[in-house]
Image: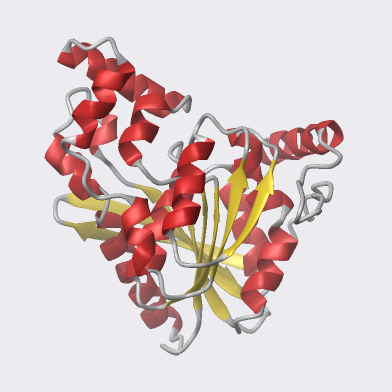
Amino acid sequence: MKTVLVTIFCSLFTFMHPALAIPPENQTLAPYQEEADSRHYETFEIKTKVEAYEYEAIVYKPTGTPIKAVLVIYPTIGGVNSIEGSNAQYFSKRGYVVIVPYLFETELNKPNPDMDKLDSDYYRPVVSVISFINYVDFKLNLPSTLPVFALGASQGGITSVLITAYVPRIKAAWFATAGGDLPYIYARSTVLQIREFRERHMRTLGMSDVDQYETYLRGYLKNDPSLSCKDIKVPFHQVIALRDTGVPTVTQELLARECPPHSIDRYKLGHEAGTLTTVLMRKKIFEYFESFI
């Protein structure tokens, strides 16, 4: 059912936006077509623990196709949905072992968050992803020289920036709708989960002004993608949505400026459609990763 909904949405999205790119890229996004699921892959689940936090992931393993790479697809803040599942199937059918982390707890889920822990939440995925990659290497008897790539959008894109900076095995990455300046994002995002967290937290603090709340967050949130991206030493591509209020466009442009030189596509899209480019552009994403194998 989820796949059907994504297919319908993508079809409407393409119909409403026949020409999405702006100069100088001058590109358009092809209509989305879901492949028939011929099951050229199998799945299994893995778990790891970082401090008191448990992380889980689903792994897609190619069958009948030689394994040539590992891909980590980090999910959006809403958790794994049809976007991640569909992309995992697409890449696994083409020889990629795909790791999709899908269960983790952060202070964002709590009514009265510990702000110091919220800041430290930022780095936990690095340890979990390294653990997942090592486990998959061992279980599938993969060579340690096999390239590993990262793909993510929205919160998954933000986390993928971190992973790309600090997971040594990552060889290249692709981020969509990822931004820097987390205090600004948490104070102004229209994404449902973040908005609910903000409203709940502001009530607890007795605040009603988002500018005041942003200032409060800056006193605690010191770790940020705009800082981590400076440590990226591998090629990566960034997709910026120019009408984004979920991860506000200004934060995406900030990330673009603070990161080392990299390729960028800019599209006149909002947050949901910008996130969906990881599906609409996945042939291009696949070709991009293939160029590093």
In this picture, residue 148 sits left or right of residue 109: right
Structure colour scheme: secondary structure
Please tell me how many numbered marks the rendered image carries: 0
In this picture, residue 216 sits left or right of residue 275: left
Depth check, front residue: 76 or 207: 207
The quarter of the picture where the C terminus appears is bottom right
Looking at the image, residue 186 lies above or below residue 145: above
Name the residue at 45% across, 89% down.
145
Task: Locate residue 76, reporting x and y percent.
Answer: 47, 43
Task: Locate residue 103, reporting x and y percent.
Answer: 36, 47
Depth check, front residue: 195 or 125: 195
Residue 90 in view here: yes
Task: Locate residue 158, reporting x and y percent.
Answer: 42, 50
The quarter of the picture where the N terminus appears is top right
| Quadrant position of residue 217 | top left
Name the residue at 68% across, 61% down.
90
Looking at the image, residue 197 lies above or below residue 77: above
Name the residue at 67% across, 80% down.
65
Residue 39 in view here: no
Name the residue at 33% across, 59% down.
228
Depth check, front residue: 37 or 133: 133
Looking at the image, residue 254 lies above or below residue 146: above
Task: Locate residue 82, reporting x and y percent.
Answer: 61, 43
Looking at the image, residue 198 lies above or below residue 288: above
